[in-house]
Amino acid sequence: MDIIQITDGLKALGDPTRLQMVALMKHRECCVCEFTAIFHISQPAISRHIGRLKNEGLVNEERRGQWVFYSLNRNKFEKLGFSLAHLPDLSEKFKELEEKGLLVNCDA
């Protein structure tokens, strides 16, 4: 991995929303619809953030029917020298959505 690739990867992580998305995906794969409910921003805006992470190879994409799920490419983070262990635990965001009845079930 060269300096430009490392710089581009770290720049992609430099946005607070994208970094929070990574912190959430540290726990499990996520769907765009879950991110829209958590961040209260539009689906196109979430898709742009995911697209940036995907372009840098930081996330993997898996299509299941009409849904697309995103997960971390942990190997890429390792190559960047970026430790996911230092990110805050944001898993309570999923619990908050569930308690409010807003947790989206994308498996249906």
Image (spheres, rainbow, N blue to C red):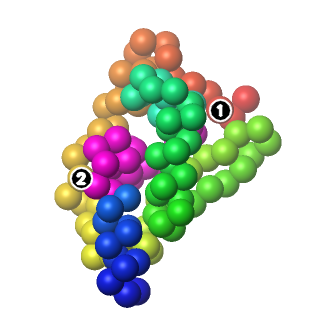
Q: Is 30 rendered above or below residue 39?
A: below
Residue furthest right as drawn: 65
Q: Secondary structure at mark 1?
A: loop
Q: Residue at x 31, y 31 (%)?
A: 92
Q: Is 60 rendered above or below residue 20?
A: below
Question: Does 21 appear in magenta?
Answer: yes
Say whether disc 1 or disc 2 marks the residue closer to the N-terminus. Answer: 2
Residue 73 in view, yes or no: no
Q: CA distance from mark 1 to mark 2?
A: 26 Å
Question: Does 87 appear in magenta?
Answer: no
Residue 2 in view, yes or no: yes
**Would you name the residue on which mark 2 appears?**
87
Q: Secondary structure at mark 2?
A: loop
Q: Is 8 rendered above or below residue 41?
A: below
Residue 36 coordinates in the image, percent (x, y) = 49, 28
Q: Badge 2: few (under 14), some or many (20 or more) residues near its Cα, within 10 Å?
A: some
Q: Residue at x 48, y 66 (%)?
A: 56
Report the amino acid beneath label 2.
Leu
Between 72 and 2, the one nearer to me in the picture: 2
Residue 16 coordinates in the image, percent (x, y) = 28, 44
Q: Residue at x 45, y 26 (%)?
A: 41
Residue 77 coordinates in the image, percent (x, y) = 37, 70
* Residue 80 in which image quadrant: bottom left
The image quadrant where one finds the C terminus is: top right
Report the amino acid beneath label 1.
Cys
Which contiguous range is marked in magenta? 13-32
Q: Residue at x 37, y 79 (%)?
A: 4
Residue furthest front as drawn: 4
Between 41 and 26, the one nearer to me in the picture: 41
Q: Which mark is residue 106?
A: 1
Q: Which mark is residue 50?
A: none
The image quadrant where one finds the N terminus is: bottom left
